[in-house]
Image (cartoon, rainbow, N blue to C red):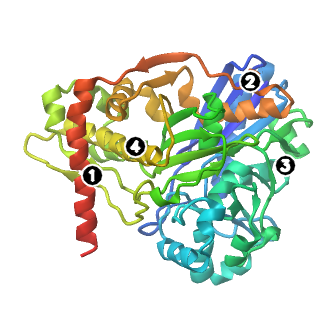
Amino acid sequence: MYLGIDLGTSEVKAVVINEDGTIVTSQSTPLTIQRPHPHWSEQSPQAWWEATDHLMTTLKEKCEKTWAAIKAVGLSGQMHGAVLLDVAGEAIRPAILWNDTRSALECAELEEIFPELHAIAGNLAMPGFTAPKLLWVRRHEPENFKRIDTVLLPKDFLRFRMTGEKISDLSDASGTLWLDVARRDWSDALLEKCSLSRHNMPKLVEGNEISATIAPDIAKRWGLNPSVVVAGGGGDNAVSAVGVGAINPGDAFISLGTSGVLFVVNETYRPAPASAVHAFCHVLPKRWHQMSVMLSAASCLQWFCRLVGVTEMALLEEVAQLSDSEKGTAPMFLPYLSGERTPHNDPDAKGMFYGLTHASNRATMGYAVLEGVSFGLADGLSALLESGTHIEQCPLVGGGARSPFWAQLLADILNMPIITHKGGETGGALGAARLAYLATGKNLDTVCKKPEIHQTWLARPEQHDSLMKRYRQFKTLYLNDLHLRNN
C-alpha cells in the first residue's frame, strides 16, 4: 500500500493505492486563501499541516484494515510558494503563493541584475516564481528577511513536519529561479543575487528517490509503521504527469485546476522564455518538461458561481442546455483574475466580461467563463507550438476533468483529441502515490502505466471554425485592454 498527498491551493487531497496500482480510497480537506491586499495571495503553512493531519485521521478510519500496510508516502504540491522558516523551524510569515503578483518590480530588478537568468533558470522572471518573492520580502519586510534560515516550497514544509528533514526535489525547485535547470543543481550565482546561499536551501533529490523516513512521533500519531519512507515527490504538474503516465518525450496533458496548465515531456532541456513557456526538470531523472501556465482556470468558474449563487454542477447543466446560437452570441470573458503568465507575462492583466446585453443570463455568462479559460489554454498551446513542441492529443486532469461539456469544448477549440482517464480528478495525489511506489524500488514502466481511458472527445471541424472567430475577438480584447492600461 502506498500513500500520495497533494497539497493544492484549494484543498489537500490524498489517495491510497495497492500493489496493483489501483486506487483503494481517496479523501480531501478544503483550504482557504487569504488576500489581505490587491495582488496578494497567501496561506498559513500551519493550516496546511492541520488539514493534512486531519486528512490522515480520516483516511485511517476509511481503510483501517489496510492502513498499517502502507510502505511509503509521496508528496505533490502547489509550486513556487515561499515558506520562510527561522532557525527554530517556525514559519516567519504566511506563505506567499504562486498566484501572488505583488513582486512585478522585483522581477524587473532580477532580469536587470542577472542577464544570464534565462539561460540558467530557463524561464522569465515572473511574480509567481519564488526568487522575486524573496526580493520583495528583502525590500519591504527587512526584519523578516534577516530571520530567514531556510526557504521551503509548500509540499516540502509538509515533509519537514513529517520527517524533520529539509529536502526538496528538482521539479519543484525548478520553479524557484534558483535552480540551474540543465545541471539539476542550485545555482550559487542566482542565490547570491537574492542575498541567499545553499545554506538557506533544502537538499535536492529526484522525485522517485527516498528523501527521508517518517518521524517516530508522526508515525505513531497517524498509525503508520515507523519504517515508512517519504519519496522526493514533486511540483503538482510534474507529479500529475506521473499519474497519467506522461513520462516519455511527447507525452502531454492539460490540468484544469485552480490554474490551467498544458504540460509536455521533453527528452532534453528546452527553454523558451521569449514566449513565457516554462522549462523545468521533470519529476523523474534525465527528463525535462515544458509548460504553458494560466493563473486562473477552474478558479474562474468557482468565482463566477460564488458571484451568482449557484453550484458548479448546476451551472454546468444550464450551460450544456444552451443552443449553438446562444453560445455564438454569448458575452466574451477574459480569465485574468490573477494576472497572467503564458503567453503574456502580465501580472496586471484583469478579468473582463464584454458584450453584455439584456439577453445575457447566468447560463450564457457561465459559458463565456468556460470558453474564456479554454481560449487561454489555446494561447498556451500556440506558445508551445511556436517553441517547436508537437502535441497530438491531451489527457485532461484536475477538477475540470469532471465536466464532459468542458472536455468537448477544449477538443473543439484546441482542435485535438481530449481524453479523460478513470480517476483523472485525483491528479497529483495519484502521481504522488506512484512516486512512493517507485521509491521502494518498483519498475518505472510497471508503476507509471497510462490509466484506463474513460472517454475521448474529438474536435468537430464546424464548431472549431466557429470558435476560432470568437478566439480572434478574445485576443483582440486583451490587446485593447493592454493598450488602455498603458495609456
Q: Is residue 250 above or below residue 192?
A: above
Q: How many marks?
A: 4
Q: Is residue 472 above or below residue 395?
A: below
Per the image, the residue denoted by label 3 is: 163
* Callout 4 crowding tier (Cα within 10 Å): few <14, some 14–19, many ≥20: many
Distance (Cα) linking label 3 and label 2? 29 Å
Q: Are dots 2 and 1 in contact, CB under 8 Å?
A: no
**Label whose residue precedes the other's in the sequence (3 or 2):** 3
For residue 445, which numbered disc appears in the image? 2
Element class at badge 2: helix
Residue occupying image coordinates x 63% and y 80%: 138
Per the image, the residue denoted by label 1 is: 475
Which amino acid does the dot numbered 2 rest on?
Asp
Name the residue nearer the viewer: 137 or 449: 449
Residue occupying image coordinates x 67% and y 51%: 172
Mark in front: 3 vs 1: 1
Percent coordinates x, y for residue 223 in the rendering: 83, 33
Mark in front: 3 vs 2: 2
**Label whose residue precedes the other's in the sequence (3 or 4):** 3
Name the residue nearer the viewer: 211 or 360: 211
Percent coordinates x, y for residue 486 in the rendering: 28, 73
Residue occupying image coordinates x 62% and y 56%: 175
**Label whose residue precedes the other's in the sequence (2 or 4):** 4
